[in-house]
């Protein structure tokens, strides 16, 4: 079978171009981990977020296992931009 012919006057086409995709919502700017794999416990465990360093470009946080205290991951959060 042949694919259907391209039609510029298709109802979903505006001015001969395909429709634009909507932008993703900005609601997922930053996510927080609640469970991470702990290398010592060898399973997914609840974690606490701990401030490790304050850098020029952001803050470095460490995720620590609540049961044994082993660091499981780290994350750098950029500082919020000040407008004005």
Image (tube, grey):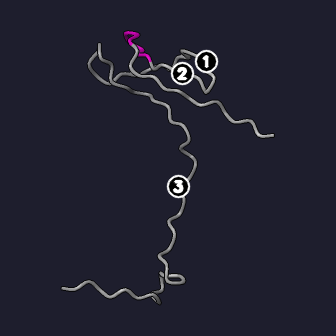
Q: Is residue 69 left or right of residue 1?
A: right
Disc sitting over residue 24 in the figure:
3
Element on which disc 1 rests: strand
Mark 3, mark 1: which one is toward the viewer?
Answer: 1
Element on which disc 3 rests: loop
Residue 45 percent across, percent down from the top left? 36, 22
Q: Residues within 10 Å of mark 1 (few under 14, many from 20)?
A: few
The residue most toward the front is 56
The residue most toward the left is 1
Give the CA separation, mark 3 to mark 1: 30 Å
Q: Residues within 10 Å of mark 2 (few under 14, many from 20)?
A: some
Q: Residues within 10 Å of mark 3 (few under 14, many from 20)?
A: few
Disc sitting over residue 54 in the figure:
1
Magenta highlight range: 64-70
- Sooner in the amino-acid sequence: mark 2 or mark 1: 1
Name the residue carrying label 2.
60
Asked if the residue under mark 1 is in contact with the one under mark 2, i.e. CB atoms within 8 Å, the reply is yes
Instruction: Find out whether residue 38 is within the magenta segment.
Output: no
- Sooner in the amino-acid sequence: mark 3 or mark 1: 3
x 52%, y 17%: residue: 50
């Amino acid at each position: 079978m042949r694919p259907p012919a391209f039609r510029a006057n298709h109802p979903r086409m505006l001015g001969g171009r395909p429709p634009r995709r909507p932008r993703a919502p900005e609601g997922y700017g930053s996510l927080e981990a609640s469970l991470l794999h702990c290398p010592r416990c060898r399973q997914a465990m609840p974690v606490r977020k701990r401030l490790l360093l304050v850098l020029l470009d952001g803050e470095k946080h460490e995720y620590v296992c609540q049961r044994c205290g082993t660091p499981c991951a780290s994350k750098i959060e950029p500082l919020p931009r000040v407008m004005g």
